[in-house]
Image: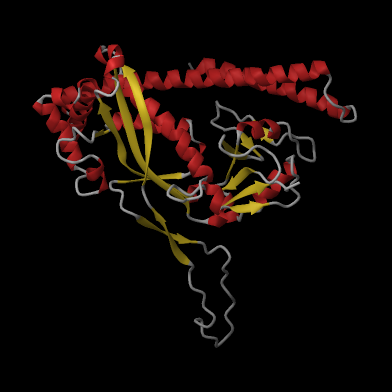
């Protein structure tokens, strides 16, 4: 698998070099436009790069799946040797949860009901118990086991750039939480004159706080044919949780990016700073991205990353510095060096705007100051009768989250001129 990935990475490097030679040739000839043949070749190279990136992701998923098989086998062997009571409880919960998905609460054995009910008790007394209707759980569904919850998290990250950038924080209950904030970057010490009281002119630390709530998201109804449900070899839990994760990821990333915070999370763009110096309405330059980088205080720049959508990234990949060097680097997978812009990592977020008048197209800064708060594990409810005439069973998921940028000076977005 490593050899396949290495070969693809090398092929991608050759294609990038060919693209750059086309650009360099046009620039050397008084900066002329591409000929029809060059444009066709350049676009084909773009498509080839996209195809290679897709193959790389496929091989990486296969590698991850192979690791999962090995880990699952090791887990079984560890259980045979005698795992802890907690691990056994999780296994019982996962097995009972699978039975619940396939057959419903009324068909569960008493042991399976206890396994599911015992997991519920972990959150009784909080908002989650009300969401589940407490008690038996038949009306309110059950919390997703950790194994499937991890699959939801993977799907969320795949469809949400902000989950790659932000700091994810989990809580057991949904009670509002005040997160303390502090930004002391503009405050300096001072020279103390002889005989002067050190307390004179003292400056207090600028402590504050921002409140994180817990807003409820739903996956909407996921319908599954009963023939699949009855197939014991079919991984029903993975199918449903992956679908839930994709749906949650798409809506939550949109809100984490640009929502106004009214009865929903507050998007990072709302509270972040804005950079507008010499930024044109419908274009972006290498200097713009460098100036954006340096507009962030060095205290936050050391952990800084860029974020932009895929179309903007395509434009940035063609930009050069004043000495004719590309500011985008493809990195080196073998050495663990990621792709970068001006030497800084970036994360693609397709909920960011394209380059255009008044748009905020590119962000830079320490996005770990954007806190994403998730409550417990997602909840799944089985709907038995609703689509019975279609020989289908339906499932609906719920997830509770909120997010805020706790330091507005840590992140800025490049905003284009209005015209």
Q: How is the image coloured?
A: secondary structure
Image position, residue 145 (x, y; %): 27, 32
Residue farthest toward the right in the current orientation of the protein: 30
- State the count of labels: 0
Image position, residue 11 (x, y; %): 63, 17
Whether residue 336 appears in this view of the structure is yes
Residue farthest toward the front in the current orientation of the protein: 389
- Name the residue at 46% across, 51% down: 262
Q: In this rendering, would 215 be left or right of 41?
A: left
Image position, residue 50 (x, y; %): 61, 21
Depth check, front residue: 305 or 196: 305
Depth check, front residue: 339 or 219: 219
- Name the residue at 42% across, 49% down: 263
Q: In this rendering, would 336 be left or right of 315?
A: left
> Is residue 396 positioned above or below 181 on the image?
above
Q: In this rendering, would 302 be left or right of 31?
A: left
Depth check, front residue: 327 or 164: 164
- Name the residue at 51% across, 85% down: 197
Whether residue 84 appears in this view of the structure is no
Residue farthest toward the left in the current orientation of the protein: 110
> Is residue 277 positioned above or below 322 on the image?
below
Q: Quadrant of residue 149?
A: top left
Residue farthest toward the bottom in the current orientation of the protein: 195
Q: Quadrant of residue 92?
A: top left
Image position, residue 85 (x, y; %): 15, 34
């Amino acid at each position: 698998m490593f050899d396949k990935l290495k070969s693809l990475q090398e092929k991608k490097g050759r294609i990038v070099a060919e693209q750059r030679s086309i650009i360099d040739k046009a620039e050397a000839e008084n900066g002329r436009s591409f000929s029809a043949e060059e444009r066709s070749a350049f676009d084909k190279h773009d498509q080839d790069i996209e195809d290679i990136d897709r193959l790389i992701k496929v091989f990486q998923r296969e590698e991850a799946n192979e690791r999962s098989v090995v880990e699952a086998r090791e887990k079984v062997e560890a259980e045979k040797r005698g795992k802890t009571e907690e691990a056994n409880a999780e296994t019982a919960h996962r097995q009972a949860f699978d039975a619940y998905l396939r057959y419903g609460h009324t068909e569960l054995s008493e042991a399976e009901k206890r396994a599911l009910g015992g997991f519920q008790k972990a959150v009784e007394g909080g908002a989650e118990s009300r969401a589940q209707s407490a008690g038996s759980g038949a009306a309110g569904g059950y919390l997703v086991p950790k194994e499937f919850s991890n699959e939801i998290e993977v799907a969320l990250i795949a469809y949400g750039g902000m989950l790659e950038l932000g700091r994810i924080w989990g809580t057991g209950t949904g009670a509002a939480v005040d997160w303390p904030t502090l930004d002391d970057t503009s405050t300096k010490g001072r020279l103390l004159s002889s005989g002067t009281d050190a307390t004179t002119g003292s400056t207090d630390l600028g402590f504050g706080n921002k409140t994180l709530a817990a807003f409820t998201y739903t996956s909407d109804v996921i319908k599954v044919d009963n023939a699949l449900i009855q197939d014991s070899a079919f991984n029903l839990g993975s199918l449903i949780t992956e679908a839930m994760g994709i749906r949650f990821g798409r809506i939550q990333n949109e809100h984490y990016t640009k929502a106004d915070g009214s009865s929903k999370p507050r998007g990072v763009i709302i509270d972040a700073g804005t950079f507008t110096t010499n930024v044109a309405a419908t274009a972006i330059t290498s200097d713009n991205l460098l100036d954006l980088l340096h507009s962030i205080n060095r205290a936050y720049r050391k952990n800084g990353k860029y974020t932009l959508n895929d179309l903007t990234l395509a434009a940035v990949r063609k930009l050069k510095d004043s000495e004719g060097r590309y500011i985008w680097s493809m990195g080196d997978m073998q050495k663990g060096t990621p792709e970068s812009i001006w030497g800084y990592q970036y994360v693609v977020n397709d909920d960011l705007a394209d380059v255009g008048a008044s748009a905020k197209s590119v962000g830079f800064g320490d996005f770990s100051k954007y806190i994403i708060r998730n409550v417990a594990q997602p909840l799944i409810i089985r709907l038995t009768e609703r689509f019975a005439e279609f020989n289908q069973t339906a499932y609906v998921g719920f997830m509770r989250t909120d997010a805020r940028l706790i330091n507005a000076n840590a992140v800025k977005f490049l905003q284009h001129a209005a015209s």
